[in-house]
Image (tube, rainbow, N blue to C red):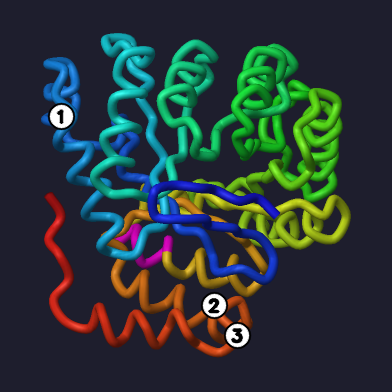
Amino acid sequence: MPTLTSRNGIRPYGPGYPTLLINDQLNIHEQAPRILRELLEGKIDLMVDIAQWGYRMGMDTVGILIDHPDLNDVELMPRIAYAIHQQVGCPIGLDSRNPVALAATLEQMRPYKCVVFTINGDQEVLDGMLPVIKKYGAVIAAMPMGHSGLGVPMTVEGRLAEARYIMEVCLGYGIPKDDIVIDAICMAASTLLPNAFQVSLATVRAVHEQLGLAVQLGVSNAGSGMPDPTSIDLACLLGAMASGVDATFMNPATLTLRESVLAMDFLTERDAVGKRYLQNWRSFYGKKPDRP
């Protein structure tokens, strides 16, 4: 199973382990303009504050995305990752296709083990990113698309074929199977694509059963374009958890997120004796922290 490490300790995830919650609010494209303004001025305090808030709300890790033509990700990403790790202590996730920025950040994060998102099956992406991921021993979380050149596969078979190809290429680079995670792809419900949600859930199960890999899902995409999107996100998450998803991107502000995930982990025996559920109830019951 994939395992992340940080100052807070070791965090394995995968079948039989508690669901890994990834704070998606450090994606600057989805944030208020003030965050971009601060980053353009070289300030990173607000990014750290959002990570801290998410961690207090129950997130396990963060997904840092610094992809903007006016920002220097080679300089900013290592600074942000290091500052969050120092102040929050959580494992770090990196959303990048820039091998130079990725290498600089993973070097800064040594000796800890991070996860790298947004890799796909495009051969140029794989050849550019996998040597860096292998060198630093990071976990790779890949989208099953890009190899066929046909966009996002809308069948389980199509996603499984892309996932199998990515796995084989990773293994060829010497990346162990335990360090490979596949994203089952969550489409926005507002697109009204037939069977989109069912295909995602079936992909979760198929990747587990046929490839033996851990699976993540970008659940925070589900409610995009709809009123009250976080309610749709939460419903999508609970359905995905029932199908065995191992990790998910979420907005920490989603109502009852922490409680629902801990309850579902308990019911699906990822938290077999309810230890995490009971610890949370004892320590977290009361007023939730305000978002910065």
- What is the C-alpha distance between the residues marked 1 and 3? 43 Å
x and y, in percent, of residue 237 in the image: 50, 65
Front-most of 151 and 23? Answer: 23
Judging by the rendered image, the residue that carries numbered circle 2 is: 265
Say which residue appears at 49% left-offset and 39% top-offset. Answer: 112
Horizontal side of residue 222 vs 139, given as left or right: left
Q: Which residues are magenta?
A: 227-233
Between label 2 and label 1, give the one nearer the viewer.
2
Label 1 residue SS: helix
- What is the C-alpha distance between the residues marked 2 and 1? 36 Å
Q: Is residue 203 magenta?
A: no
Above or below, 140 relative to 129: below
Label 3 residue SS: loop
Judging by the rendered image, the residue that carries numbered circle 3 is: 272
Judging by the rendered image, the residue that carries numbered circle 1 is: 33
Say few, some or many: other residues with alpha carbon within 10 Å of mark 2 (under 14 / 14 to 19 / 20 or more): many
Q: Are marks 1 and 3 in contact (CB under 8 Å)?
A: no
Query: Quick one: label 2 or label 1, which is nearer the N terminus?
Result: 1
* Residue type highlighted by circle 2: Asp
Horizontal side of residue 125 vs 173, given as left or right: left
* Residue type highlighted by circle 3: Ala
Horizontal side of residue 221 vs 31, given as left or right: right
x and y, in percent, of residue 16 in the image: 67, 71
Query: Quick one: label 1 or label 3, which is nearer the N terminus?
Result: 1
- What is the C-alpha distance between the residues marked 3 and 2? 8 Å
* Residue 29 in view in this figure: yes
Quadrant of the frame with the N terminus: bottom right
Label 2 residue SS: helix
Q: Quadrant of residue 230?
A: bottom left
Horizontal side of residue 114 vs 154, given as left or right: left
Q: Main secondary structure of the magenta part?
A: helix
* Residue type highlighted by circle 1: Pro
